[in-house]
Image: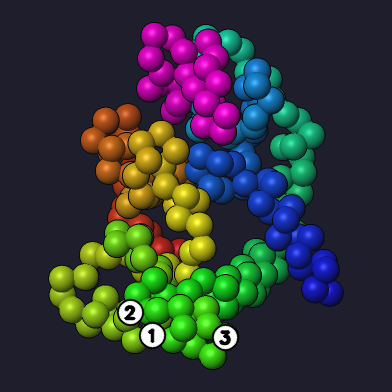
Amino acid sequence: MATSAEDRSVLEEELTCPVCLDLYRDPHLLPCGHNFCLPCLRRLKSRSDHGRLRCPECRQSHRSSANWQKNFKLANIADGFRRRGQSERSTQSRSDASHRAAQVRCDYCPEDASEDGKGPAAVKTCLKCEVSMCPKHVQPHLELPAFREHPLVEPLGDMRKRKCLEHDEMFRYYCLDERLFLCNACTIEGTHAGHSIKTLKNAMKDFK
């Protein structure tokens, strides 16, 4: 059963769009061979310079006027994976989160502060401070008003998964209309004007 769960986790990672971090919806191919949701490609096209856009994966430049081809096989696989049941995915997500929590260490504690010499395990990661914290060091974030707007998520081992590839900034917001994570620069540039945008903290409350 463990192998099946691991296989499902790997498959979910392969079916996740690198831009919106969600399962592919209407995936299309760039000439370099990388896939992205069509709304994500349109968003990149709207911000392209001199009629060219860069692939978020390999940074290769392409003509923004080029016709993108839909990846029908990938679309069918992603849709089938999505239909397998919300309850099953939710259970697996909690299992994966517990596994990650055991691997991510507190950034504030010295490495020799635990029996295994690797430092205490983190219980939360702050997206604003970009640090992972153990139960002791996360307390100020939970109690002090100064940290009220700091979004806390399950421990992250790789911060790059929560950073905007275009602006190299941490995601702070979520666009409900396009189902995209946004950084500060994304909201300032105005391409989401008129859209329903929430802070990650409030968006996560709605999703619970």
Q: Earlier in the sequence, mark 1 or mark 3?
A: 3
Q: Which residue is mark 1?
A: 135
Mark 1: few/some/many CA within 10 Å (<14, 14-19, 20+)? few
Horizontal relation, residue 103 to residue 190: left or right: right
Three-letter amino acid code of the residue under disc 2 = Val
Judging from the image, the colouring scheme is rainbow
Of residues 176 and 131, the one nearer the viewer is 131
> Between marks 1 and 2, how big is the CA–CA gap?
5 Å
Residue placed furthest toward the left: 146
Identify which residue is drawn at 48% across, 74% down: 105
The type of residue carrying mark 3 is Asp
Q: Are marks 1 and 2 in contact (CB under 8 Å)?
A: yes
What is the C-alpha distance between the residues marked 1 and 3? Answer: 18 Å
* Amino acid type for the residue under numbered disc 1: Pro
The disc at residue 101 is: none
Q: Residue at x 34, y 44 (%)?
A: 169
Per the image, the residue denoted by label 3 is 116
What are the residue bounds of the magenta stretch?
Answer: 42-63
Query: Disc 3 versus disc 2: distance between alpha carbons?
Result: 21 Å
Which of pointers 3 and 2 lies earlier in the amino acid sequence? 3
- Quarter-wise, where is residue 60 in the image? top right
Residue 69: percent from left, percent from top: 68, 20
Query: 100 left or right of 186?
Result: right
